[in-house]
Amino acid sequence: MMQKKRTSFLEIKKFLLKNNTYLIGLILFAACAAASKDFLTMSNLVNICQQYASTIIVSTGMLFVILTGGIDLSVGSIVAIGSVLSAYALTAWEWGVWPACVISMIAGVVCGLISGFFVAKTGMAPFVATLAMMTMARGVAYMISNGAPIITPSGTIGALGTAKIFPWLTWLTIIAVIVVAIAWFLLNYLSFGRMIIAIGSNEEAVHLAGIDVTPVKISAYAISGFCSAIGGIIACSRTAIGSPAVGTGLELDCIAACVIGGASLNGGVGSPIKTVIGVLILALIGNIMNLLAVPSYPQDVIKGVIIICAVLLQRFTNESEK
C-alpha cells in the first residue's frame, strides 16, 4: 500500500512538473479574473489576442532558433522592416495588399538567411551575428521610411487589423493560430523539426552521424525572419501605419516568452504551444497591471522576476527528471 501511494505521488509530481507552464497560466488567469471585474469582458479578451498576435508569431519563430542552441536579437528590427516595407509598397509603389505583404516576408527571410549564414557557415556566435543584423535591419527600416511613420491608404492593410469573423474572433488571431499550428506540425511530425531539436540537444552527435547541419541551422534563422516580417505586417495592420520604431525591445519579450514556456537556452527543449502560453502569461501581467492602473515601470520589474522564477523552475524540472 505504501509503495502504491509513493508511486502515485511521484506520478502526480511528474505531471505537475511537466505541465507547470499550463498550471502557471491557469493560476494567473484566475488571479486576474479575481483582481478586476473588467478582465473577463469580451472586449478586453479580444484586445489581448489582437495586441499580442504579433508577439506570438515572432516568439514562435524565435523558438526555432533557440531550439538549435542559438539566439536571434534581430527579430524586433525585422518587425520594423516588415511594417515599413509593406506600408511603403502600398503608398509609394501603389501595390495591392498581398504583393506588399509578400515583399515584406521575402525581406524578412533574406535577413534571417544572412544571420543564419554567418552563424552556421562561418561559426560566428549567434549573439554577434544577430546583434549586427538587429542594427542593420533597424537602419534599413529608417532608410525606407526616411525616419518617419508611413500612413497607409485607407481600406487597405488597416482593414485586416480590424476585420472580425465573429465578435470574439479576429483575422489576426486566426493568423497567429495558423502559424503556431504549422510550427507545431513541423517540430513534431517532420524530420526537419526533429533535426532542429537534435542539433540543439547534441550538435556533435548529428555531425558524427554524417548529417550536414548547416542548411538546417540557416533555415531556423530564415523561419525566424519570416515570422518577424509577418509580425511587422500585423503591427502595420493594427495601426494602419508603418513605423520604423515598432518592435523595439520585442526580442527580449520573445526570449522571455520562450523561456517561460519551458524552452532551454541551451537548445533542444521547447514547444510552440508552451511558447504561446509564455506570451499569454506576459500579456496577462501587462493587462491586469493596466486595468489596476499600475505604472509601466513596476511591470518591467515583475516581468524580470517571473523570468528568473521560470528559469529556476525549469532547472528544478530538469533535475527532477534525471
Image (cartoon, rainbow, N blue to C red):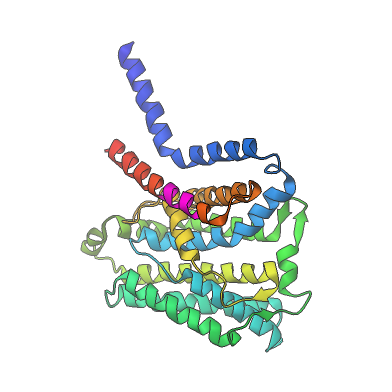
**Position of 252 compared to 149: left or right?**
left
Relative depth, front residue between 91 and 15:
91
Q: Which residue is pictured at 76% across the width and 56% down the height?
A: 165
Q: How many marks?
A: 0
Which secondary structure dominates the residues rendered in magenta?
Answer: helix
Instruction: Tell me where residue 314 sits by quadrant.
Output: top left
Instruction: Tell me where residue 178 sits by quadrant.
Output: bottom right
Q: Is residue 305 magenta?
A: yes
Q: Quadrant of the N terminus?
A: top left
| Image coordinates for residue 117, horizontal then vertical, percent | 35, 77
Q: Quadrant of the C terminus?
A: top left
Q: Which residue is pictured at 34% across the width and 56% down the height?
A: 265
**Position of 173 compared to 270: left or right?**
right
| Image coordinates for residue 42, horizontal then vertical, percent | 73, 46
Q: Which residue is pictured at 49% across the width and 39% down the height?
A: 24
| Image coordinates for residue 52, horizontal then vertical, percent | 60, 57
Relative depth, front residue between 175 and 75:
75
Q: Is residue 199 placed above or below 3 in the rendered structure?
A: below
| Image coordinates for residue 140, horizontal then vertical, percent | 51, 84
Magenta part of the protein: which range?
300-307
Q: Is residue 26 placed above or below 288 in the rendered structure?
A: above
For the view shown, which residue lies furthest in the top direction?
A: 1
Q: Is residue 189 visible?
A: no
